Amino acid sequence: MNAKDRVFAEILVRGPIPFERFMEIALYGPEGFFGGDHLRSEKGGDFLTSPEVSPLFGETLAVYVERERERIGQPFQLVEVAAGSGSLLVPLLEEVDVDAWAVEISPAARSKLGALLPNDRVLTELPDRVRGVILANELLDNLPMAVAQKIDNRWRERWVGAEDDTLHFVDADPRPEVVAWLDANAGDVPDGGWVEVQLEAQTWLRDALDRLDAGSVVIIDYGDTAENLIPRRRDGTLRTYRAHHLGPHPLDEPGATDITADVNFTALIAAAERKGAVIQLSRQDDFLADLGLRQRLSDLRHAELEAARSGDEMERLRLRSLKTEAETLMHPRGLGDFRVFHAIV
Ligand SMILES: C[S@@+](CC[C@H](N)C(=O)[O-])C[C@H]1O[C@@H](n2cnc3c(N)ncnc32)[C@H](O)[C@@H]1O
């Protein structure tokens, strides 16, 4: 059975299914995009994330972790959720000596992480109690979500139905929790507009904060506040990626593409405020600059010139490549435009 057959089989028994259930099968089922033996988040994979662009990302975040350790003292733990290939954790741990755990649900990622960390440090869910930093890069955009559309000023849900051998969106009465989320977090959506309803992202954040005795939860992802997402609401932000490019319609090839949407940070701010956390929302370029990456970039530029002057071509190429990586991490219309959300306890 493949993921598409699994979706069809479930629809045959239950009738149309909510989009979050479709996404769960398509991404995390046994034949799902993250379910098989392919490691998705690496250079040869389907999307390129900041830690996969450069070890400078993990190295720079080490400065944040060190600051948090100075702020709250010992005991101190670092927990990376959605740790993927370990490309963030490895360079980070070379810079700062802390007890670290990785949380992953993808079997392929877990086996890679198992080669990097002791087995009891690779978990499928957060530890019961954490004192330190809980970090998640590009997790929340991948958590299953519902989909809604505003029609004649009222919310309708878009579920997934099947006809012949095609999956398509079907109209459904919105569930009360979906309407409550939309009313609180969607903002001023135009008629006909599509919204991804990120209840699971909120639940994940609440759970992380409940487990945190002191320290911070740091979420890095694409997306924006509800207000700033309004221009993207006409068609919504749901999309797929495959082999580093935008892929087909999300319903077309379940299991074969990543399915993702922009994170609504307004919903996360509301959830964290209710837990009494102090919140900061910044851009990735500003966040990394504050941790020293802009200075590092300037040092790399000077060092590259120096290497060129002294005729050390190998060194010049190495420095140039690092410099390009730092520029990519802070590109104002690319990764630099990601949001960094901290909830501090
Ligand atoms: C886009 S990848 C990002 C991987 C890595 N953070 C990076 O930036 O390269 C999303 C990852 O989230 C993982 N994931 C999804 N839901 C999860 C959950 N509830 N707990 C832990 N990991 C999860 C997936 O298995 C996948 O490896």
Image (cartoon, helix red, strand yellow):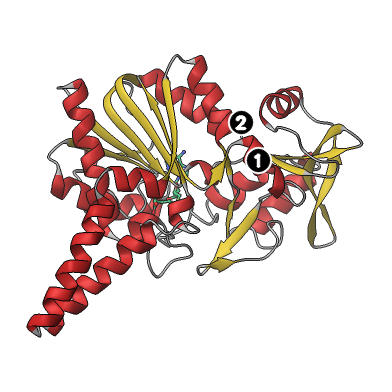
Which mark, by number, is residue 20? 1
Real-space Cα distance between discs 2 and 1? Answer: 10 Å
The image position of residue 258, as x and y in percent, is: 56, 57
The image position of residue 70, as x and y in percent, is: 16, 27
The image position of residue 318, as x and y in percent, is: 19, 74
Looking at the image, which is closer to me, 151 or 101? 151
Identify residue type, mark 2: Leu
Asked which quadrant contains residue 19, the reply is: top right
- Element class at badge 1: helix
Q: Residue at x 66, y 51 (%)?
A: 238
Crowd class of label 1 (few under 14; some 14 to 19; many from 20; radius 10 Å): many
- Classify mark 2 as within 8 Å of ligand 1 or not, answering yes or no: no
Looking at the image, which is closer to me, 210 or 1? 210
Q: Is residue 125 visible?
A: no
Identify residue type, mark 1: Glu
Q: Which residue carries the number 2 mark? A: 199
Q: Earlier in the sequence, mark 2 or mark 1?
A: 1
- Taking the view exactly as shown, the residue that stands out farthest to the right is 152
Image: 212 above or below 217: above
User: Marks 2 and 1: which is nearer the front?
Assistant: 2
Q: Is residue 98 visible?
A: yes
Task: Say which quadrant the N terminus sits in.
Answer: bottom right
Image: 37 above or below 83: below
Crowd class of label 2 (few under 14; some 14 to 19; many from 20; radius 10 Å): some
